[in-house]
């Protein structure tokens, strides 16, 4: 079996790692991959936006299954093109990926299907005055969002009215996020803890992975600007069985049914970003793919063989699937470059990666890494490494992960020291 993973982050390294453990010993390709995927798979020098290049590679190399990691190629229709050519894919059609690609669409969709989400209004180009009047009537805190994909920079949580007016100005007048803000969604501020729920689905049947919590802000105590995610842990104890039952009934099932009824069945991995509010679980956003860094904690906790799982999603056999979740906890601490999430430096040599890197309990997933001309592993992105530990308890997993983080160095490395503390406080 030959499997191609599209993407180059820690998520894709963790997917490759889960496939490499499979009893069926698949041949794994990653396009374009990173210095970590190169150790366990074949990196293919193709950009994830190069649809024709990917199709040609898949045909020439007789790839049996494609797993698409990031959202952008899905929103651009990569899964449609591959399926139209008879290739099995894990990932939704462009029509279904609108759940992530257009917040205006996803909010209207939730409203049509009675799925709990923050109240909102959508504004289009030229309506900045209306948007400003609207936030003045609503008051702060309030959340201003670019509707389109904005690499994690599109949601601006505004604690005061001047911040909201500035956000509207930046998105709608100065157009700082370009076309992503051709439509702007302004929604009510929700309070509670956030949880990431991953729904593996063939469009009809579904299974879920361990509920995870991300740490989106750069700074400890959830301070500073948003990032792609600075660490994660799973399972999140705040997500009780009662909450899970409610989420399935009021959110997951109506979402899958709604997408089928509207002619865009969702096949792939639906990431439901939830806020556990005092009024019940509420959707903050949908994503059309696995999360990063959540994948690095949810896949190691999955008992089933990853090849069987991804094949079942692509071939419509999720009803026959039993995934099983290990009893323990997983923790992932992200090491990021100096300056991230702003402009950052690249090319810093990373040391301390070798010893005990993959002994089963601690794994180092690479994100922004590359090899320099001397064969050294260097930083090449904002988020560089995701150090992950799995252990019977959250406490022990945290200790293992942080001990391993201490052994890794590169100039300017930054990481948060408070990953998983919310979970510990609840345990
Ligand atoms: P999004 O891009 O929609 O996932 O938003 C990014 C992050 O902004 C979320 O993970 C939340 O932390 C925060 N956020 C988004 N929408 C809201 C909201 N309505 N209320 C409070 N926080 C929000
Ligand atoms: N960790 C959040 C995301 O992948 O969007």
Image: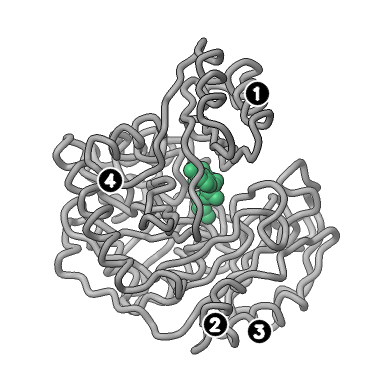
Q: Which residue is mark 3?
A: 399
Nearest the eye: 95 or 37: 95
Residue hosting label 4: 115
State left or right for residue 384 relative to residue 192. right
Residue drawn at 31 percent across, 65 percent down = 208
Lateral position of residue 113 relative to residue 179, left or right:
left
Sequence-wise, the earlier of marks 1 and 4 is 4
- The x and y percentages for residue 141 are 58, 39
Q: Nearer the viewer, mark 1 or mark 4?
A: 4
State the residue at coordinates (64%, 78%): 401
Tag of residue 403: none
Question: Which badge, 3 or 4, comes first in the chain's sequence?
Answer: 4
Asked whether mark 2 and ligand 2 are closer than 8 Å, the reply comes as no
Mark 3 and mark 1: Cα distance apart in space:
42 Å
* Residue denoted by label 2: 394
In the displayed structure, would residue 270 be above or below residue 143?
below
Tell me how far mark 3 sits from mark 2, CA to CA. Answer: 9 Å
Residue 206 in the figure: left or right of residue 73: left
Up-down relation of residue 120 to residue 247 (above or below)? above
Instruction: From the viewer's side, name the closer residue of 37 and 421.
Output: 421
Q: Residue at left 41%, top 42%?
A: 118
Determine whether the residue tagged by mark 3 lies in a helix, strand or loop.
helix
The label on residue 170 is 1
Where residue 405 appears, x then y in whole percent?
72, 74
Q: Which is closer to the viewer, label 3 or label 4? A: 4
Point out the tag, 1 or 2, that comes first from the N-terminus: 1
Q: Earlier in the sequence, mark 2 or mark 4?
A: 4
Measure how far apart labels 1 and 4 are at the Cα level.
30 Å
């Amino acid at each position: 079996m030959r499997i191609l993973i599209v993407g180059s982050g820690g998520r894709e390294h963790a997917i490759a790692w889960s496939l490499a453990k499979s009893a069926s010993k698949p041949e794994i390709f990653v396009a374009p991959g990173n210095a970590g995927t190169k150790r366990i798979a074949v990196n293919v020098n193709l950009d994830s936006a190069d649809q024709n290049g990917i199709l040609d590679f898949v045909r020439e190399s007789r790839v049996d299954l494609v797993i698409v990691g990031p959202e952008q190629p899905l929103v651009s229709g990569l899964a449609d093109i591959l399926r139209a050519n008879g290739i099995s894919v894990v990932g939704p059609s462009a029509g279904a990926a609108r759940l992530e690609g257009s917040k205006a669409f996803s909010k209207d969709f939730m409203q049509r299907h009675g799925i709990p989400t923050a109240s909102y209004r959508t504004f289009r180009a030229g309506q900045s005055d209306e948007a400003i009047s609207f936030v003045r009537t609503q008051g702060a805190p309030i959340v201003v969002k670019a509707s389109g994909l904005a690499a994690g920079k599109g949601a601006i949580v505004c604690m005061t009215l001047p911040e909201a007016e500035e956000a509207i100005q930046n998105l709608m007048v100065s157009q700082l996020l370009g076309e992503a803000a051709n439509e702007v969604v302004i929604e009510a501020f929700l309070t509670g803890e956030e949880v990431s729920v991953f729904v593996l689905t063939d469009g009809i049947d579904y299974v879920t992975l361990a509920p995870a919590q991300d740490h989106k802000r750069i700074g400890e105590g959830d301070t500073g600007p948003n990032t792609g995610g600075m660490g994660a842990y799973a399972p999140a104890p705040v997500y009780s069985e009662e909450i899970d039952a409610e989420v399935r009934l009021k959110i997951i099932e109506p979402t899958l049914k709604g997408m089928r009824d509207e002619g865009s069945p969702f096949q792939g991995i639906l990431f439901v970003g939830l806020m556990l509010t005092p009024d019940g679980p509420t959707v903050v956003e949908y994503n059309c793919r696995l999360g990063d860094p959540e994948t690095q904690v949810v896949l190691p906790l999955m008992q089933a063989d990853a090849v069987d799982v991804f094949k079942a999603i692509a071939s419509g056999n999720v009803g026959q699937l039993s995934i099983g979740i290990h009893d323990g906890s997983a923790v992932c601490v992200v090491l990021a470059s100096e300056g991230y999430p702003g402009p950052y430096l690249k090319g810093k040599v990373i040391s301390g990666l070798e010893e005990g890197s993959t002994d089963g309990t601690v794994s180092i997933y690479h994100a922004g890494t590359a090899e320099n001309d001397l064969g050294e592993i260097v930083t090449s992105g904002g988020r560089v490494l995701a150090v992950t530990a799995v252990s019977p308890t959250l406490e022990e997993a945290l200790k293992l992960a942080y001990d391993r983080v201490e052994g890794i160095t590169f100039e300017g490395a930054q990481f948060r020291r408070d990953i998983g503390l919310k979970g510990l406080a609840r345990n």
